[in-house]
């Protein structure tokens, strides 16, 4: 499970990441990353999820959310402490294997975080 301190909660944070951050599209998800340069954050990166009705019914959306949170928690050490990330699930994420989701999140996160650092 993704610890509470590593989650995005405010809609303003989601908006800042999506509007100002770098993005990398993958088959199962779109990864948005933004380097929070306003203040030095202690405690590590923060993740947020967007799983729309296009992904499926409520049971499917909650299953996808749980899977993505679990994968994000396993990748906390690979992301800088000052990075905010929003992961937007695509409909393909509902039927994707665990390995596909891990690969897409890892590669998307690396590319988007590198772009975000370059633009900061």
Image: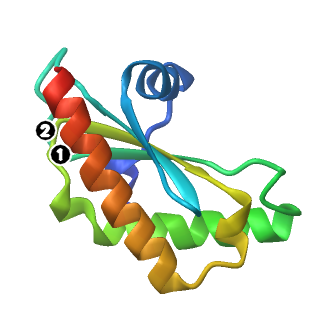
Q: Residue at x 19, y 47 (%)?
A: 44
Q: SS for tag 1?
A: loop
Q: What kind of element bears circle 2?
A: loop
Q: Residue at x 24, y 35 (%)?
A: 115
Quarter of the rendering containing residue 21: top left
* Tag of residue 42: 2
In the foreground, 90 or 7: 90
Q: Is residue 1 visible?
A: no
Quick one: which residue is furthest to the right in this view? 57
Number of residues whose C-alpha sits closer than 10 Å to that of mark 1, classed few (under 14), some (14–19) or many (20 or more): few
Which of the 4 image quarters holds residue 55? bottom right
Local crowd size for mark 2, using a 10 Å CA cut-off: few (<14), some (14–19), many (≥20): few
Residue corresponding to mark 1: 43
- Residue nearest the viewer, comparing 23 with 6: 23
Q: Give the left or right position of residue 73, taking residue 113 as reference.
A: right
The percent coordinates of residue 23 (x first, y second) are 41, 37
> In the image, what residue occupies the spot 23% across and 25% down?
36
The answer to whether one can see residue 53 in this image is: yes
Residue 66: horizontal and vertical position, in percent?
58, 69
Locate residue 56, reporting x and y percent.
Answer: 84, 62
Circle 1/circle 2 CB separation < 8 Å: yes
120 left or right, relative to 106:
left
Quarter holding the N terminus is bottom left
The image's colouring method is rainbow
């Amino acid at each position: 499970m993704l610890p509470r301190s590593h989650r995005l909660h405010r809609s303003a944070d989601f908006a800042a990441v999506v509007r100002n951050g770098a993005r990398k599209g993958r088959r199962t998800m779109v990864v948005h990353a933004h380097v929070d340069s306003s203040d030095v954050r202690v405690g590590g990166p923060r993740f947020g999820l967007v799983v729309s009705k296009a992904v499926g019914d409520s049971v499917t959306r909650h299953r996808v959310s749980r899977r993505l949170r679990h994968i994000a928690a396993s990748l906390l050490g690979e992301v800088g402490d000052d990075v905010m990330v929003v992961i937007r699930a695509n409909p393909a994420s509902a039927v994707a294997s665990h390995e596909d989701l891990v690969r897409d999140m890892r590669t998307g996160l690396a590319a988007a975080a590198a772009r975000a650092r370059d633009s900061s």
